[in-house]
Amino acid sequence: MADVRPGTGGSRYVPYEERTGNESVVYFTRDLSPEGLCRIYEKVSGSISGRTGIKLHTGEKNGPNIIPRAWVRELVEKDLPEAAIVETNTFYDGDRYTTEAHRETLKVNGWTFCPVDIMDEDGTVLLPVQGGKWFTEMSCGSHMTSYDSLVVLTHFKGHTMGGFGGSNKNIGIGCADGRIGKKWIHQRGDQQWGIAEEELMERITESTKATIDYFGKNICYINVMRNMSVSCDCEGVDAAPVVTPDTGIIASLDILAADQASVDLIYAMTEKDHHDLVERIETRHGHRQLSYMKEIGMGNDRYILIDLDHEEKRITPGEAVAGVKPFKLIRG
């Protein structure tokens, strides 16, 4: 049943003990390295088959905080040799606004070791949104329907409008095409970028639902909690400085559980360590991403957190954060 108690809006963090419903399995490792990424992917890869896309935020030119290319290259070479990175063009006028500019940016950022499919290069496809209140369908890149499976590989961080950018934002914005879908999410009438707070979170989430319903069981979610600025990677070299500690990698077959566990790990940090990112999430009503995913049946906000670094022991987010250091960190 949806959590509809008063006071659970997008600006309020809901503690674990106040949540109801089933639990999903979430995996966690502190091993921020190519090996750590490959190991945690193997835990959620069972239903990934056929032609596979890797939904990755490839970043604006020279963005400092994106997932390291070497990590993704090792994942592709070891586990997904036939896969393609998938992206769409942007709604804002930047380094990835047109397909031509986007391809140049991909070269600058080093995404040259496997195919990169700009899914809206040849147009759009409409996918149904079941149970939404803003959309009955979402406009996505037309190439999406040529894939059998999707690996959602997300750099978890803050976001200027969304509060935080996890798996939900990666798909909801990142699979919507640059001219139609992203416009539907951000604009009402002539109010460009006029949608904010609760409504924006709901629109992003409904867009995500169109994609995950399309792939069904053939999808998994990985959040890399490293270089977590309050800014999105779409801000490139202008991103705010990183002040939140590197944490680890989260993975699940449940998108809500993956994003909720990532947020819980942030809230389990000390006030000093999480202040800026918590403020960004709450002032943008980012928690509404989580509560709305639950309302429209996209997953569970309760979960079993499995620590891969300690013989797959079940732990709490607080225990995970307390054990973050020392951890293996390889920057790339």
Image (cartoon, rainbow, N blue to C red):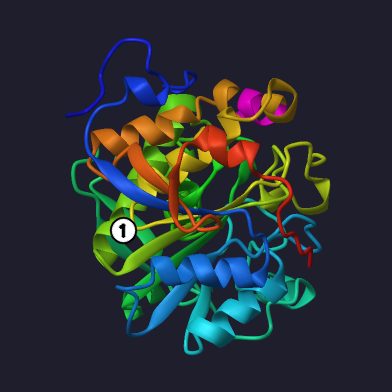
Q: Is residue 285 magenta?
A: no
Residue 117 drawn at (x, y percent): 52, 78
Number of marks: 1
Q: Nearer the viewer, residue 126 or 261?
A: 261
Note whether 175 is above or below 105 in the view shown: above
> Residue 15 appears in which quarter of the rendering?
top left
- For the C terminus, the image quarter is bottom right
- Residues 52 and 17: in front is 17
Q: Within 10 Å of the Cα at label 1, are there few (<14), some (14-19), or many (20+) other Cα atoms?
A: many
In the rendering, at what x and y percent does residue 25 appear? Answer: 34, 51
Instruction: Give the secondary structure at mark 1.
Output: helix
User: Which quadrant of the structure image shows residue 99?
Assistant: bottom right
Q: Mark 1 points at which residue?
A: 212
From which residue to which does the magenta span run?
276-280
Pick the quarter of the image with the N terminus: top left
Q: In this view, does 29 lie to the left or right of 107?
A: left
Please name whichever residue, 246 or 112, is drawn nearer the observer in this view of the structure: 246
Q: In this view, does 127 lie above or below 3?
A: below
Quarter of the image where one finds residue 108: bottom right
Side of 322 where 187 appears, left or right: left
State whether residue 320 appears in this view: yes
Prevailing SS of the magenta stretch: helix
Q: Nearer the viewer, residue 181 or 268?
A: 268
